[in-house]
Amino acid sequence: MKPVKLDKKGRIIVTEAMTLKQVRSYLKALGVFHWRNHQSLASFKGLPDLEGVHRKQHFYIEVKAPKGKLSEHQEKFIKTVMNEGERVFVAFGFDGFRMEFDCWRKENA
């Protein structure tokens, strides 16, 4: 495990990798079927980090560091699939993602 980095005030610097690990652990604990999309030269540009299916509903999750920013390709992909009725979560941190995902799960219960 990599050492945790601290800012000048001694607070943990949350990275994208940390948030991704928390999100995946949470989905696994809930029994939500999901998978990691690995990027390569042949990948569709802007494809989110995670994809899954829950209660016959397909979803995508793009994970960012708290101060991260979506790329132009990511914004285009998200807009395109949302226009087709797909659900996309953008996780700029675990707590916000968890609240949004839990609300969505309740709506689709």
Image: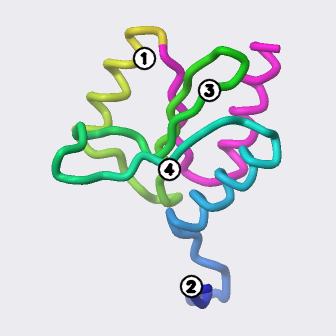
Which residue range is magenta in the image?
86-109
Q: Is residue 98 magenta?
A: yes
In space, the residues marked 2 and 1 are separated at their CA atoms by: 36 Å
Q: Residue at x 42, y 46 (%)?
A: 37
Mark 4 or 3, nearer chain start: 3
Amino acid type shown at disc 1 = Met
Amino acid type shown at disc 3 = Val
Query: Hey, which quadrant is residue 25 in on the image?
Result: bottom right
Q: Is residue 72 magenta?
A: no
Q: Are marks 3 and 2 in contact (CB under 8 Å)?
A: no
Mark 2 or 4, nearer chain start: 2
In space, the residues marked 4 and 1 are separated at their CA atoms by: 17 Å
**For mark 1, what is the residue?**
82
**For mark 2, what is the residue?**
7
In space, the residues marked 3 and 2 are separated at their CA atoms by: 37 Å
Amino acid type shown at disc 2 = Asp
**For mark 4, what is the residue?**
63
